[in-house]
């Protein structure tokens, strides 16, 4: 059988699998329903980066998504840049969504108005379930939406927590404490209050994980941590550096031993509460500050804590795969990777099959916000294509048969995240 036929058969089987979507930023469906939608929705979110790189000024991008302006005007803002980005992976997800969800083979001058009308017609209660469950066969999405929202069924919350250890002012400490529903004075008060908060959210909201970022943290030191805490309590700030231009919640400036010591406590809490620690690594801004290698000391110090390493530390994919090989407490997550570069995603999976046990991989996470939920299906189809191609290569080389390949694929798309995240489905 030819390679093309093997891949085609695998792809058909993969599109029949039920899926665990291992990373989204979906808030309540009401966020999606609160605004009208149109074809320009498909060219927001990650596509913004390609449009900016192609030359679109930020003001034009903002106007393109200003629903108070006429659709034809806003489409005209996109027109000069669309030929420059349409062949990239970010845009491809939009074209797949237009075809599979709304029946349009192209997004063009001739189709954008009808496509917009079709999208708005579907923008009604139940749109999440229609896209995710009915069209994508996604059983649940692990999400970090607004206020780490989850609905206990389709959306399961993963709580962003880097603001808890990375505090630069006493007001930030007290703001976090108010969120925890506690009064804190000492460093140990703060840690205990956070653990109680985490336990409550897990019990009452079904929270399944905590989310941090790979960062170049200094060495932890209890004495230095206490000294830093006392500085904050005395009204002195720990310098924070500049906020990330697109993500003000992302610490890009000075990190203190206090931050590392608190992060170590957070990772201990995750182990005690049986929560996985999702860890962003790789792309955004100066991606060198976010590479997975910064987390190796944490992986070593916390062998009982499970880590979900996002994005294969793109573009440092090779290093991430070696981490997955060497650390039993680390899983490799291809979320976002397929739409950043299918080429690198496939290369990473080839290396994973050489190096990493097949129970340590999560194949897919759409990584979209509510306004771009349509593109989850585009990203999923690209992920399924990548997995089918890599496994077909193994079959053609005589390294596995089709049944074995499908067993691996099911592990990557379903079994592994269910087991690692302790999902009760």
Image (cartoon, rainbow, N blue to C red):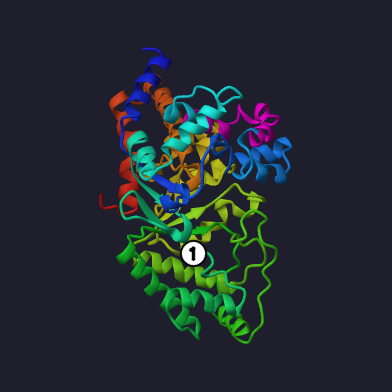
Q: Is residue 323 visible?
A: no
> Which residue is label 1 attached to?
161
Point out residue 218 in the picture as x, y percentages from the top left corner. 61, 67
Q: Is residue 217 above or below residue 1?
A: below
For the point 54% across and 67% down, which residue is it? 163
- In front: 68, or 422? 68
Residue reaching furthest top? 1
For the point 39% across and 50% down, which residue is it? 142
Point out residue 202 in the picture as x, y percentages from the top left corner. 34, 64
Instruction: Verify whether residue 89 appears in magenta.
Output: yes
Q: Is residue 117 above or below residue 423?
A: above
Point out residue 92 in the picture as x, y percentages from the top left corner. 54, 30
- In front: 354, or 222? 222
Q: Which residues are magenta?
A: 73-97
Point out residue 94 in the picture as x, y percentages from the top left corner. 52, 33
Instruction: Verify whether residue 9 appears in magenta.
Output: no
Residue 372 is left or right of residue 247, and the answer is: left
Residue reaching furthest left? 425
């Amino acid at each position: 059988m030819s390679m093309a036929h093997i891949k085609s058969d695998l792809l058909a089987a993969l599109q029949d699998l039920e899926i665990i979507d291992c990373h989204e930023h979906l808030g309540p469906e009401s966020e999606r329903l609160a605004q009208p939608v149109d074809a320009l929705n498909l060219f927001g979110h990650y596509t913004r980066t390609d449009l900016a790189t192609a030359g679109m000024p930020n003001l034009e991008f903002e106007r393109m998504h200003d629903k108070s302006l006429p659709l034809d005007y806003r489409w005209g803002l996109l027109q000069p840049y669309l030929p420059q980005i349409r062949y990239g992976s970010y845009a491809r997800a939009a074209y797949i969504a237009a075809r599979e969800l709304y029946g349009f083979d192209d997004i063009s001058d001739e189709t954008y108005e009808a496509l917009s009308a079709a999208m708005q017609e579907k923008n009604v209660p139940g749109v999440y379930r229609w896209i995710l469950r009915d069209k994508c066969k996604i059983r649940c999405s692990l999400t970090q939406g607004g206020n780490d929202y989850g609905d206990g069924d389709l959306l399961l919350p993963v709580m962003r927590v880097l603001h808890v250890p990375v505090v630069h002012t006493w007001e930030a400490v007290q703001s976090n404490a108010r969120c925890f529903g506690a009064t804190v004075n000492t460093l140990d008060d703060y840690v205990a209050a956070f653990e109680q908060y985490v336990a409550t959210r897990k019990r009452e909201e079904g929270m399944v994980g905590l989310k941090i970022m790979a960062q170049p943290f200094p060495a932890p030191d209890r004495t230095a941590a206490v000294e830093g805490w006392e500085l904050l309590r005395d009204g002195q700030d720990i310098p924070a550096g500049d906020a990330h231009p697109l993500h003000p919640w992302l610490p890009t400036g000075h990190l203190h031993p206090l931050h590392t010591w608190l992060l170590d406590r957070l990772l201990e809490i995750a182990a005690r509460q049986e929560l996985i620690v999702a860890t962003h690594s790789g792309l955004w801004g100066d991606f060198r500050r976010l590479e997975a290698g910064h987390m190796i000391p944490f992986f070593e110090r916390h062998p009982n804590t499970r880590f979900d390493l996002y994005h294969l530390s793109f573009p440092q994919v090779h290093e991430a795969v070696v981490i997955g090989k060497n650390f039993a407490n680390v899983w490799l997550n291809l979320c976002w990777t397929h739409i950043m570069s299918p080429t690198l995603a496939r290369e990473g999976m080839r290396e994973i099959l050489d190096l990493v046990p097949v129970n340590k991989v999560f194949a897919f996470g759409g990584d979209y916000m509510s306004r771009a939920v349509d593109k989850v299906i585009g990203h999923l189809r690209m992920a399924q294509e990548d997995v089918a191609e890599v496994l077909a290569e193994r079959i053609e080389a005589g390294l596995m048969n089709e049944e074995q390949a499908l067993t691996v694929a099911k592990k990557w798309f379903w079994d592994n995240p269910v087991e690692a995240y302790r999902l009760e489905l």
